[in-house]
Image (cartoon, rainbow, N blue to C red):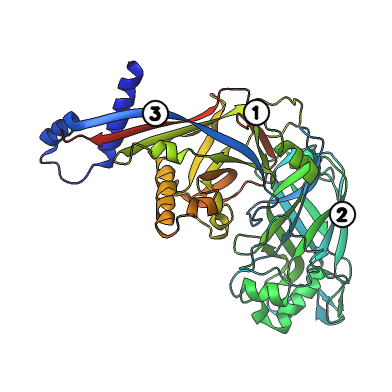
């Protein structure tokens, strides 16, 4: 009895908020009269689920992933490699040519040049020895093209075969930097430093003492090449691809890549100048993820549970009982519809267990590509978020009533023009649970939603051979009786 009373109160609160307007002169009498006519009912329905293999996901992200690790859950390897372009400020300028002190054979030069990959977090062992190669892109990967996480610039002939190619062995803890410096969080940010100071030959056969000299002379030949990022990318630096060659044990989460050109110039005295070009949201950055497909498929075939696994691994597909929910309630309002997805605790323990995905998004199955390609934002009508509760060990989709309404209306519209619509659209009542990363503004409004490409994994109660209590959706209906 207490449960029913609570359900009625919840429904009344929901209706009260939904019905608020600017008119308050009759609120006393109207609320009393409406409550006498209000009828509230509840019901619970079973939800089915299965694992869904994500062969690849849209790879554009503000974080790049670099490294190779062994998944402790499956012993399979996961490799992250990435391409980045560099942004230049509008109408960027080097100091005037005659102020440059660094000169060779009568022409300006850079004293040195480097790329730095700054990372704010990582997975694995920071002392694991890794080896990468930096490849110069032959042509830019273009804005407006949807690059997925299985896109390999080398395989697609976008890398210069005779271009800049630098090999670098590194550890995430840079032992060439003193511990006192590394521990000073106010002045030091962990990074992988890749020197570009060897002789460089451009596409026209011109040779420079280093890549930075090439960049500087491109400016002095034609400053418009630095007018904006588009010109810079298409006429000077199309970007670089970072490929893992050897090593296993770490994955760096790179939040910014930076091309630094060092030179000396004089004003009142001689100064050391640095021109910095950074990989930012204004230019393209893509991560190429390589998973063990056989292992991923074997996990998805396990019907005793469902999986959420990133990067670019496994989602969970949920079939919502839309017909059961709306049958005999055609004239009712669905006030709330709640689904809880409960985690199954990991069997694997150790120093490098994968993190639990923190934010899940529910969207219709037919939107799993278009949502990200269109850069949509969660609207809580056709898309919903749930965050992980460590207290209860679950993800609570507190009210997806808008999803039920949307899917049912979509079906009804389809049947109006095609009696075979349901047979031709077997996924009409299916949604997919996708791990995502969100960006908010200063007002805490969500401004960006992208795929979570970090290393996470969890099992959820569900699957056709589920040994636990079934997943359910709890629904509260209301309607006004005229009797």
Mark 1 = which residue?
A: 465
Question: What residue is rendered at 31% in x and 35% in y?
Answer: 14
Mark 2–mark 3 distance (CA, rounded to whole Å): 61 Å
Q: Quadrant of residue 214?
A: bottom right
Residue 94 in the figure: left or right of residue 44: right
Question: Which label sits in the foreground, 2 or 3?
Answer: 3
Determine the secondary structure under disc 3: strand
Q: Residues within 10 Å of mark 1 (few under 14, many from 20)?
A: few
Query: Can you give x and y, in whole percent of width and height, for residue 373 in the image?
Result: 57, 59
Whichever of labels 2 and 3 marks the residue nearer the N terminus, that label is: 3
Residue 338 in the figure: left or right of residue 464: left
- Give the quarter of the figure containing the C terminus: top left
Whichever of labels 3 and 1 marks the residue nearer the N terminus, that label is: 3
Mark 2 = which residue?
A: 168
Determine the secondary structure under disc 1: loop
Determine the secondary structure under disc 2: strand
Query: Can you give x and y, in whole percent of width and height, for residue 11 in the image?
Result: 31, 31
Nearer to us in this view, 438 or 182? 438
Question: What residue is rendered at 68% in x and 32% in y?
Answer: 303
Question: What residue is rendered at 64% in x and 81% in y?
Answer: 224
Mark 3 = which residue?
A: 43
């Amino acid at each position: 009895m207490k449960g029913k009373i609570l359900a009625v109160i919840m429904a009344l609160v929901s209706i009260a908020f939904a019905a608020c307007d600017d008119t308050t002169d009759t609120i006393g009498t109207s609320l009393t009269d409406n409550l006498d006519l209000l009828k509230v009912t509840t019901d619970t329905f079973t939800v089915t689920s299965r694992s869904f293999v994500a062969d690849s996901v849209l790879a554009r992200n503000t974080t790049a992933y670099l490294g190779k690790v062994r998944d402790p859950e499956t012993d399979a390897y996961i490799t992250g490699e990435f391409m980045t372009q560099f942004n230049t400020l509008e109408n960027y300028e080097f100091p005037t040519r005659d102020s440059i002190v660094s000169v060779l054979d009568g022409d300006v030069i850079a004293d040195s040049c480097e790329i730095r990959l700054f990372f704010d977090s990582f997975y694995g062992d920071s002392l694991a020895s890794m080896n990468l190669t930096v490849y110069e892109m032959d042509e830019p990967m273009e804005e407006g093209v949807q690059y997925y996480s299985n896109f390999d610039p080398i395989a697609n002939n976008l890398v210069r075969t005779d271009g800049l190619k630098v090999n670098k062995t590194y550890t995430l803890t840079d032992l060439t930097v003193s511990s006192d410096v590394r521990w000073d969080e106010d002045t030091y940010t962990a990074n992988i430093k890749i020197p570009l100071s060897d002789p460089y030959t451009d596409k026209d056969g011109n040779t420079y003492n280093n890549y930075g000299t090439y960049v500087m002379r491109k400016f002095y030949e034609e400053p418009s090449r630095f007018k904006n990022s588009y010109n810079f990318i298409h006429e000077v630096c199309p970007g670089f691809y970072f490929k893992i060659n050897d090593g296993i044990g770490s994955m760096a989460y790179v939040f910014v890549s930076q091309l630094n050109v060092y030179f000396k110039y004089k004003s009142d005295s001689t100064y050391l100048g640095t021109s910095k070009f950074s990989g930012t949201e204004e230019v393209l950055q893509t991560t190429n993820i390589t998973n063990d497909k056989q292992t991923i498929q074997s996990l998805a075939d396990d019907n005793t549970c469902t999986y959420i696994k990133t990067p670019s691994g496994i989602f969970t597909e949920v079939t919502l009982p839309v017909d059961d929910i709306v049958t005999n309630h055609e004239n009712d309002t669905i006030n709330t519809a709640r689904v809880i997805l409960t985690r199954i605790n990991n069997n694997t323990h150790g120093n490098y267990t994968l993190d639990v995905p923190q934010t899940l998004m529910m969207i219709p199955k037919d939107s799993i590509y278009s949502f990200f390609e269109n850069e949509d934002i969660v609207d809580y009508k056709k898309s919903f978020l749930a965050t992980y509760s460590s207290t209860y060990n679950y993800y609570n989709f507190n009210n997806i009533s808008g999803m039920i309404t949307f899917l049912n209306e979509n079906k009804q519209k389809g049947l109006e023009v095609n009696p075979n619509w349901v047979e031709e659209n077997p996924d009409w009542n299916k949604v997919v649970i996708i791990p995502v990363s969100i960006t908010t503004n200063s007002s805490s409004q969500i401004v960006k939603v992208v795929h979570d490409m970090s290393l996470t994994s969890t099992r959820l109660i569900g699957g056709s051979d589920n040994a636990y209590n079934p997943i359910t959706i709890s629904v509260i209906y209301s309607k006004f009786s005229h009797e």
